[in-house]
Structure formats: structure tokens, C-alpha cells
Image (spheres, rainbow, N blue to C red):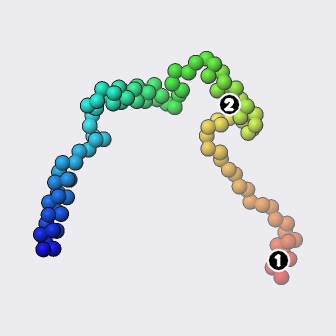
Amino acid sequence: MLTSSLVAGLRAARSSVVFSRNLAAAPTASDPIQQLFLDKIREYKQKSAGGKLVDPSPEIEKELKAEREKLEKQFGGGSGVDMTAFPTFKFEEPKLDPIDEQAAKK
């Protein structure tokens, strides 16, 4: 009885695996609304290549420039400084007083 229920469960699992469908691999959508959505996403991907703004107006570009200048003043940027790069840190060895080194050995 246990084996018959186990076999029936395996058959059901096998048939569900066989009839499952990979929706991510489908190249096109069957619904026209979904197809329009996919087309717009692909168009946006092409326009935004390189991390640029998509169809910016002159007002938005002016506002972006003003905000970047404000951030440069606030955080120490300036001409020739790349504010988008990860900062580099320099740690120098501290200079020790030779008198303190002799006192620590005693």
C-alpha cells in the first residue's frame, strides 16, 4: 500500500515536471500588452547604455549639474576630481619617539 502511493506520487511529480514551461526562455510574449511592455524595456535598455539619463530635458540637465556642484563643494571635490570613483585611502606609519621605545623595553 505504501509503495503504490509512492509510485503514484512519483508519476504525478514526473508529469508536472514534463509539462512545466520555462517562461524566461520564451523570446516573445503571447499577449500584445506583454509584448509592448517587453519592447519598451528593450528600447529603454538601448537608450540608457553607459549609465546616461534617458531623454533628459535641459531643465533636468541643469538641475543635475547644480546638484553635482553642490556635492563637490560639500565633500571636497573640484575640477579634475572624479566624484564617482571609490576613494583611495593612504595609511602612513606613525612616527614614534625613540625615548618612548626605550622606556617600553624595560
Q: Residue at x 61, y 40 (%)?
A: 85
Question: Disc 1 versus disc 2: distance between alpha carbons?
Answer: 51 Å
- Residue 68, numbered label: 2
The mark closer to the camera, 1 or 2, is: 2
Q: Nearer the viewer, residue 25 or 50?
A: 25
- Quadrant containing the N terminus is bottom left
Instruction: Name the amino acid, label 1.
Output: Ala
Q: Please, is residue 15 above or below residue 9 in the view?
A: above
Instruction: Name the amino acid, label 2.
Output: Arg
Q: Secondary structure at mark 2?
A: helix
Q: Quick check: 41 left or right of 101?
A: left
Q: Please, is residue 20 above or below residue 73 in the view?
A: below
Q: Position of residue 62 (x, y in %)?
A: 66, 21
Q: Residue at x 20, y 53 (%)?
A: 17
- Quadrant containing the C terminus is bottom right
Q: Residue at x 12, y 69 (%)?
A: 4
Crowding at dot 2, Cα within 10 Å, few <14 / some 14-19 / many 20+, comes out as: few
Q: Report whether residue 91 is seen.
A: yes
Q: Position of residue 81 (x, y in %)?
A: 68, 35
Quadrant of residue 87 within the rendered picture: top right
Q: Quick check: 94 left or right of 45?
A: right
- Residue 104, numbered label: 1
Q: Position of residue 72 (x, y in %)?
A: 72, 34
Crowding at dot 1, Cα within 10 Å, few <14 / some 14-19 / many 20+, comes out as: few
Query: Count of labels shown?
Result: 2
Quadrant of residue 8 within the rendered picture: bottom left
Q: Residue at x 16, y 68 (%)?
A: 6
Taking the view exactly as shown, the residue that stands out farthest to the bottom is 106
Q: Secondary structure at mark 1?
A: helix
Q: Nearer the viewer, residue 64 or 24?
A: 24
Q: Nearer the viewer, residue 15 or 22?
A: 15
